[in-house]
Structures are given as C-alpha cells and as structure tokens.
C-alpha cells in the first residue's frame, strides 16, 4: 500500500451517532492491533520503514513518533540509517499541545505523559519538512482517526501546507471512511 501525504484539520463531531461510530471504529482497530503477534508486528513494521525511507530524501527536518507497543515500530528506522539524517525530532506533550524536540539517538527519549516516550524539555524545532503521523485508521483521502485526545489534529492545523504529512499504519488500518 502506498502511503499518502496527509493534510488534516478535522473538527470534533457533535452528533451522538457519529461519536458512537468513531468509538466503535477505535475499539475495532485497538482490538486488531492487539491481535498482531510481536513477530508479525516487527515484520510488517520493517516493511513500512523500508517504504518510508525514500520520503526522507532531500528533507532537512524530520518528525517521527515513538510507537506505542501496538503501533508500527518506527524505532527500526534508526537501524536503517536514520541516525545519519541532520535533524530528527519527536513530539512532546505540554498541556494540551504538541511540540517537537530534536534528538540525536533513541536514548534521547524518556517515558512521558501517557507512557509514550518523548524528548526531554528543551528548544523546539521551528520548521518541519516531513512529519510521520500515527493514527488508529486512515482513509485514502488522508482523513485520520486518532486516539481521541486531539493532540495531532491541533498540531497539524498549525503547520505550513508545504510540510509533508505521512500517515503511518498497518494495511488493515486503511478504511473506506471515517465518521467526522
């Protein structure tokens, strides 16, 4: 499956039926993610990382995310040569906002809010050329279903349209539509 650039600025749905549909889709995806064996997750993650590498060419500033145990393992990118890249940053939660901080190695990440590894406090990155975006589900049009807190939705609405956004997921997480 070819990963697509994403430009996403979603709003929260008010209708109870849409909320229920979103909740059901989140529950379904969480269950499917938990059902992947560790070996299957690693094999699929390696294929995803290999497909992502060409997106990095010519980019000066990359934003990644530290995966949760059920998400594609982007840590594998470091073994595939990511450490040679000039500027790699990861998200850090501050209140209800996300900011990105540069790191030189995975050892620069520490357990943070919600148990997600994140960089220590420090100056943020002002310009991102490419950002990898996590999600529970994506459509071919780039609509994203996150975990529900809205961190990425709020952040993505603040960055320039020139920043390339790439949704990262396993193939079964691509769906025809997402309730909005």
Image (cartoon, rainbow, N blue to C red):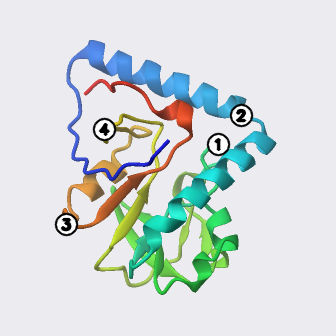
Q: Which residue is mark 4?
A: 143
Q: Position of residue 165 (x, y in %)?
A: 34, 58
Callout 3 secondary element: loop
Callout 4 secondary element: loop
Work out how far the residue at label 3 is from the one at label 2, CA to CA, in angstroms. Answer: 35 Å
| Label 2 neighbour load within 10 Å: few <14, some 14-19, many 20+ | some
Callout 1 secondary element: loop
| Label 1 neighbour load within 10 Å: few <14, some 14-19, many 20+ | some
Does label 1 or label 4 sit earlier along the sequence?
1
Q: Which residue is mark 2?
A: 36
Q: Which residue is mark 1?
A: 70
Does label 3 or label 4 sit earlier along the sequence?
4
Q: Are marks 4 and 2 in contact (CB under 8 Å)?
A: no
Q: Which residue is mark 3?
A: 160
Quarter of the C terminus within the rendering: top left
Which residue is depicted at the point 26% across and 53% down? 154
């Amino acid at each position: 499956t070819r990963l697509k650039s994403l430009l996403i600025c979603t709003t929260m749905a008010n209708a109870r039926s849409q909320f229920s549909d979103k909740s059901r889709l989140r529950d379904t995806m969480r269950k499917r993610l938990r059902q992947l064996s560790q070996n299957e997750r690693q094999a699929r993650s390696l294929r995803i990382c290999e497909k992502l590498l060409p997106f990095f060419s010519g980019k000066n500033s990359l934003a990644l995310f530290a995966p949760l145990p059920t998400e594609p393992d982007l840590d594998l990118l470091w073994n595939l040569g990511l450490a040679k890249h000039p500027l790699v940053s990861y998200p850090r939660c501050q209140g209800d906002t996300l900011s990105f901080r540069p790191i030189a190695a995975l050892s620069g990440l520490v357990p943070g809010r919600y148990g997600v590894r994140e960089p220590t406090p420090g100056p943020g990155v002002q310009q991102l050329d490419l950002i990898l975006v996590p999600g529970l589900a994506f459509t071919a049009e780039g609509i994203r279903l996150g975990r529900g807190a809205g961190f990425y939705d709020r952040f993505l609405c603040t960055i320039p349209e020139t920043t390339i956004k790439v949704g990262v997921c396993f193939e079964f997480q691509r769906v025809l539509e997402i309730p909005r």
